[in-house]
Image: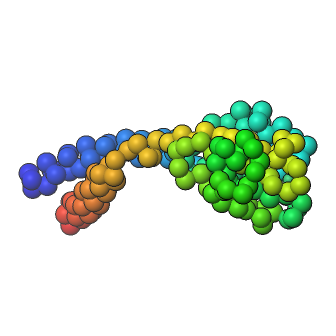
C-alpha cells in the first residue's frame, strides 16, 4: 500500500510537469505557427500597379510561411529568380521556379533571400517584383531529441494515469 501512495505522489508531480509542458507546447506552437500571406493583401493581390517592395517591409517572413500569389492566369506570372535576374529582369537564366496557375502557393522552405518577379510584358521592369529575407523560425532551432523527451514524458504520464485509475479501484474495492 505504501508503494502505491509514493507512486501517487510522484504521479501528482508528473501531472504538474505535464501541465507545464502543455503550456510550453502551446507557446511553442503559437510562436512556430507558419503563416499564409497573400501577396499585395486581399485588395491588391499580384498586379502591375502596386509597390511590393514597401508592402514586403511590413512582414517578417520565416521558414514555413506560405506566399499566395493571386492573379488572372496569363495576365501575370511568378518567377522565383536569382538576385542578378531580379535586377535585370532578363530570364534567359537565373530562374529557380516558375509559377503560372494564378493561385500559386509558394512555401518559403529555406532561410535565405528570395527574389520574385513577373515576366509578362514589361511588368518586371515597371516594378512588379520584390525581394524578401526569410529567417529560420523557432522550431528549426530546437533539436530533434526534444520531441523524444516530450514523448517519454507523455508515456510516463499515461502509465501514471493507469496507475492512478488502479489506485482508485483499489481504494473503492
Ligand atoms: Cu505581371
x and y percentages locating residue 8 in the rendered image: 20, 50
* Near-viewer residue (79 or 145): 79
Among all residues in the image, which is located at the extreme front?
92
- In the rendered view, does 15 fall on the left or right side of 91? left
Please name the residue shown 84% across and 44% down the image.
Answer: 125
* Quadrant where the C terminus is found in the figure: bottom left
Quadrant position of residue 154: bottom left
Residue at position x 24%, y 61% from top? 159
- Residue 22, how many percent across, how many down? 41, 46
Q: In this view, does 107 lie above or below 173?
A: above
Q: How is the image coloured?
A: rainbow
Q: In which quarter of the image is the N terminus?
A: bottom left
Task: Classify residue 165 by image quadrant.
Answer: bottom left
Eyeballing the image, is 38 above or below 53? below
Q: How many marks?
A: 0
Q: Is residue 118 above or below residue 125?
A: below
Q: In this orientation, which residue lies closer to the viewer: 49 or 29? A: 49
Question: In the image, is 2 to the left or to the right of 171?
Answer: left
x and y percent of residue 33 in the render? 56, 48
- Residue at 26%, 47% in the rendered image: 14
Q: Note whether residue 42 is visible.
A: no
| Front in this rendered view, residue 164 or 121 | 121
Which residue ends up furthest to the left in the rendered image?
A: 2
| Image location (x, y in percent) of residue 12 | 26, 46
> On the image, which quarter does residue 75 sit in?
bottom right
> What's the residue at 50%, 42% (across, down)?
136
Q: Can residue 149 be seen in this view?
A: yes
Amino acid at each position: 500500500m505504501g508503494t502505491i501512495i509514493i507512486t501517487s505522489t510522484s504521479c501528482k508531480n508528473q501531472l504538474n510537469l505535464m501541465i507545464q509542458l502543455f503550456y510550453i507546447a502551446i507557446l511553442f506552437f503559437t510562436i512556430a505557427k507558419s503563416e499564409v500571406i497573400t501577396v499585395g493583401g486581399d485588395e491588391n493581390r499580384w498586379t502591375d500597379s502596386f509597390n511590393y517592395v514597401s508592402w514586403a517591409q511590413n512582414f517578417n517572413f520565416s521558414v514555413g510561411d506560405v506566399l499566395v500569389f493571386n492573379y488572372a492566369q496569363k495576365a501575370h506570372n511568378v518567377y522565383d529568380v536569382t538576385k542578378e535576374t531580379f535586377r535585370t529582369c532578363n530570364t534567359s537564366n537565373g530562374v529557380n521556379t516558375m509559377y503560372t496557375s494564378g493561385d500559386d502557393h509558394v512555401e518559403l522552405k529555406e532561410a535565405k533571400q528570395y527574389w520574385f518577379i513577373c515576366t509578362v510584358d514589361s511588368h518586371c521592369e515597371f516594378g512588379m517584383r520584390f525581394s524578401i529575407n526569410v529567417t529560420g523560425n523557432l522550431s528549426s532551432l530546437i533539436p530533434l531529441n526534444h520531441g523524444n523527451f516530450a514523448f517519454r514524458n507523455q508515456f510516463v504520464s499515461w502509465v501514471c494515469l493507469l496507475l492512478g485509475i488502479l489506485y482508485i479501484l483499489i481504494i473503492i474495492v
